[in-house]
Image (spheres, rainbow, N blue to C red):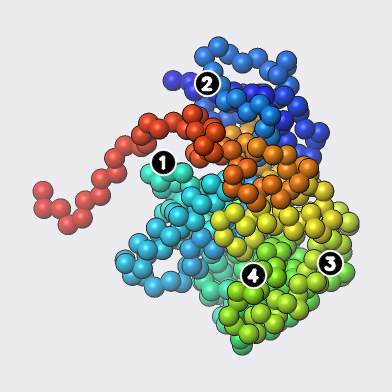
Amino acid sequence: MVNTQAIVGSTIIDGTGSEPIAKGTILIRDGKIVDVGSYENVVVPPDASMIDATGKFTMPGIIDAHVHVTPNQDVPNDVRINLRIGFSAINTLRQSLGAGVTTVVSIGGGPAAVELTNAINEGYVDKCANQITAGVVNASGGHVRGRHADGPWEIRKAVRELASAGCTMIKTAATGGFQWEHERVHWPDYTEEELIALVDECRMRDMPVAAHAHGHEGFKYAVNAKVHMVHHGALIDDEGLEAITKADLYFVPTLFTTSIGRVAKVESPWTKERMEAAYPIHREGVAKAHNMGTKIALGTDGGPGDAMIELSEFVDCGMSPMDAIVAGTRNTADALSILDRVGTVETGKDADLLIVSKNPLDDIDVLQVQDNISLVMTHGKVQTTSEEMKTYLDPRLSGPPRLIVRVNADA
C-alpha cells in the first residue's frame, strides 16, 4: 500500500543554501521525498495525508558526526554491563531525535553498537535517531581506545576486521588530546605512513575516516593521508587551515569540546587547563576556516541536542544562520558519504525532516529550545511532536514481525 503525505504551508529551508521557499509543499511517498516546491507548483493527490505546517519552518534533520553513544569498543564483555549500555544508548538516541538531530554517528561504538544500528534500521527499536556505527583503530598508547594496531599491515587487518563486523566508518587519532594525563596535545599518534595505509584500506571498503587531531604535525599527517574529515582542530594554525582547505577535506571542529560551560564541569585539572587554553584558538581557527572557504561539517563530542549549541557556536564564529544550517545538514551528510540519502530537502532523499515553530534564519538559537521543535520525522514517519502537532503522531502500534531467539531449547 502506497503511503503519501504532504507537508503544506511552511517556509522550506532545504539545506542547500538556496533561498527559502515560502508557503511550500513537500510531497512524500513511502518515506521518500518525491516533490518540493511552492504550493502552486506541487500537485497533492487527493489520498495524501496532510500535515499543516502553516506559519512554521521545515528543514532537514540535523546530523551530528561525533557522539559517544556507547563507550568505545573495548568495554568488558559482560552481559549486565552491555544491557545497561544498550538501554543508555537507546535513551541517548531518543533524546537526540526529540531535539531535532535525526542522524548520529556513534563515533567509537564498534561491533557491539552495530547490533543497535541494525535493530533501529529493522524497526525493532523505534523513535531513535538514525545511527552510523564507527569502529576505532588506534595506536598502542594512543589517545582513543579501540582496536590497537601498529604498522601499516596490522592497521589494514584491523580495518578489515571492523568492516566485516559491520562497522561502516572508522575513527582514528592523529594526535594526542585533552583527556589523558600522560599525553600531550601536540604528540602525533600515528606516522603519516600508517595513516595512509588506514585511509587506503577504508577507501577500498567505502568507509569514511574521521581523524581526531588538534594541530601541529599529526594534523598535517592526517591531511596528507586524505582522511575524509578531521575532527576537533582545537589548536589549528594557519598552515593546517591552508592544508585542509587545499586538500578539499572536511573540518569538523566540535567547538562544544572547548565550550566554557563544559570546561567548568571537567574534573581532571589537566583536561580543564588544556581546554581553557584552547578555547580562543579553537574559535579563531573556525572563523578563519569559514572566511577561507574551508568545508565545515558538524560534530559535537557531546550529547543529545548539543548539535544545536554547535550551530550557535558556528554563528558566533562568523557564519550566517543559513551557513550554519548547511554545515549541520548538507555538509555533514557529504562528509559521511550519505548525501545521496539525507542532508537536504530534495527529490529522492529520505524524508528526515524538522518542522520548527520559529525562524532559525532570524535567530539560530531558537533550535536550542525544545518547545520550538514542533515535529520530527525520519523516513517519512512522524516520530515526535509538540503538543500542538500531536494529531500527526500515529498512536497505532506497528512494527516488524516478532523476533524469536531460542537459547538452549530442548524441543
Q: Please provide percent x and percent y for residue 158.
A: 53, 67
Residue 380 located left or right of residue 282: left
**Residue 250, position in %: x, y?**
74, 57
Q: Give the mark, 2 or 4, whose residue is nearer the N terminus.
A: 2
In three-dimensional space, the C-alpha distance between marks 4 and 3, rounded to whole angstroms, equals 19 Å
383 or 188: which is nearer to us? 383
In terms of depth relative to the viewer, which is nearer, 92 or 330? 92
Label 2 amino acid? Ser
User: Residue 164 location, x and y as percent?
Assistant: 47, 57
Badge number at residue 300:
none
| Direction top: furthest residue | 46
SS class, disc 2: strand
- CA gap between label 3 and label 2 equals 48 Å
- When the figure is inspected, residue 108 is found, relative to residue 62, above or below; the finding is below
**Is the C-beta separation of discs 4 and 3 under 8 Å?**
no
| Local SS, label 1 | loop
Upstream in sequence: badge 4 or badge 3: 4
* Residue at x 44%, y 54% (from the top left corner): 90
- Report the amino acid beneath label 1: Gly
Q: Which residue is mark 3?
A: 284
**Which residue position holds label 2?**
49
Q: Amino acid at mark 3?
A: Glu
Name the residue at the bottom extreme: 182
Mark nearer the N terminus (3 vs 2): 2
Q: CA distance from mark 1 to mark 2?
A: 22 Å
Residue at 31 percent across and 66 percent down: it is: 79
Q: Amino acid at mark 4?
A: Arg
Q: Residue furthest left?
A: 411
> CB of mark 2 within 8 Å of CB of mark 4?
no
Distance of mark 1 from mark 3, alpha carbons?
43 Å
Q: Which residue is mark 1?
A: 123
Element under disc 4? helix
